[in-house]
Image: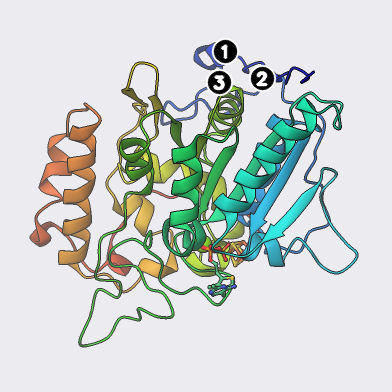
Amino acid sequence: MAKEVIRQHLPLMEEEGRAAATDDDAGRDRHYLPDVPDEDPYQAGHRTCAGCGPAIEYRWVLKAAGQDTVVAGPTGCMYVANSTYLCTPYTVPWAHTPIASGGSFTSGMAAGYEALIRKGRHPGPYPNIIVMAGDGSASDIGLGSISGALYRNHDALFICYDNECYANTGIQVSPTTPYASMTTFTPFGKAKPEGTSLPPKNLAKMMAAGHPHCYVATTTVGYPVDLMNKTRKGLNHRGAAFMHCFTPCQKGWVYQTSMTVEIGRRVVEAGLFPVWEYDPAERTYSYFHPPVQRPVTDYLAMQGRFGHMLPEHIASIQAQANRNWQDIGMDVPAGLREGEDPAKHLRLREETYSMPLNRGVGA
Ligand SMILES: Cc1ncc(C[n+]2csc(CCOP(=O)(O)OP(=O)(O)O)c2C)c(N)n1
Ligand code: SF4
Ligand SMILES: [Mg+2]
């Protein structure tokens, strides 16, 4: 007789304590830290760059998931830097997949565990099954395979760690690379002073709209508890879940290594990466409203990849941010509306912008 497949349930971390936490001068909850698990299924000893956003995301996702987890990783930085011969930072099973096959490989793992448990050949419970694919894999080369897995509703969490470029092969443009940033395939010059000329693909909205039975969420490395709770919600969800995580790439974006988490917050406070959750039961979106709204220059000017921007490029990005504020149900302050006018800007490298006091080593 077929055995029952027992599912795990991961508790959510308390987020209410935030209000009582010490604020910084911008009113943000800076020092809030609930009971985060001690265990680290993604250990030190990998070879990513200092300040690597995807490595931070990997660590927090696996902290949230715990030891009864299996992980797949399509080709990209987080495969190459983490799997040197005879050396691995994982204390959980991990497998590399071709860049196009993260979704199909993970479908196979999920179906395989179901079958093995039913036949009594795996003692269970059903493990947390996670695939973490880069943006090149998830939004481009492997998009079809992930979409197929979501459509078939395999019980697994599909994550896109988004560093907005094909990082591992030398920072080439990907479908999530932002307008007017520079990559090695989209340098700025006379013909294209903006560098990247296309707007980025809205991957998470595509996934939610196209697979309405799936749990879908966005998050960034600027919000560790949000990231870990959404990991757990995605794993607790019975069926397929997709999480899109904004993960700065120090090497490709050119910023001070200590600023990864700060950039993960600023992109949200600048209105350029809305953080939200899609509930498949109600078929509704809920949007996070950050307590701080900044001009986009506070975000852009911290990164060398935008250093060439001209006033019209900044104005265009501010207009996009203002549309995003409206889409998530927030008012657009007058100062940010004014920023839609190129005449209000200088070249990016000449703009004044707010910079945290703690600039870190080398500042
Ligand atoms: C079919 C195929 N095309 C190209 C490559 C070369 N390749 C290896 S890693 C990589 C970059 C992947 O980018 P992304 O998925 O965004 O991950 P990241 O390197 O940014 O972490 C590419 C293009 C490959 N391995 N397979
Ligand atoms: S190139 Fe970027 S994504 Fe790759 S290891 Fe370095 S910081 Fe991380
Ligand atoms: Mg990438």
Callout 2 touching callout 1 (CB < 8 Å): yes
Residue that label 2 marks = 34
- Which residue is drawn at the image coordinates 63% and 52% (left, top)? 105
Q: Nearer the viewer, residue 356 or 158?
A: 158
| Disc 2 residue type (three-letter) | Pro
Could you tell me residue 164's position as x and y percent?
44, 60
Q: Nearer the viewer, residue 216 or 344?
A: 216
Residue that label 3 marks = 22
Foreground: disc 2 or disc 3: 2
Sequence-earlier tag: 2 or 1: 1
Q: What's the mark number on residue 17?
A: 1
Q: CA distance from mark 2 to mark 1?
A: 8 Å
Indicate left or right for 181 with 238 as reference.
left
- Which residue is drawn at the image coordinates 72% and 65% (left, top)? 81
- Which residue is drawn at the image coordinates 60% and 36% (left, top)? 156
The colour style of the image is: rainbow
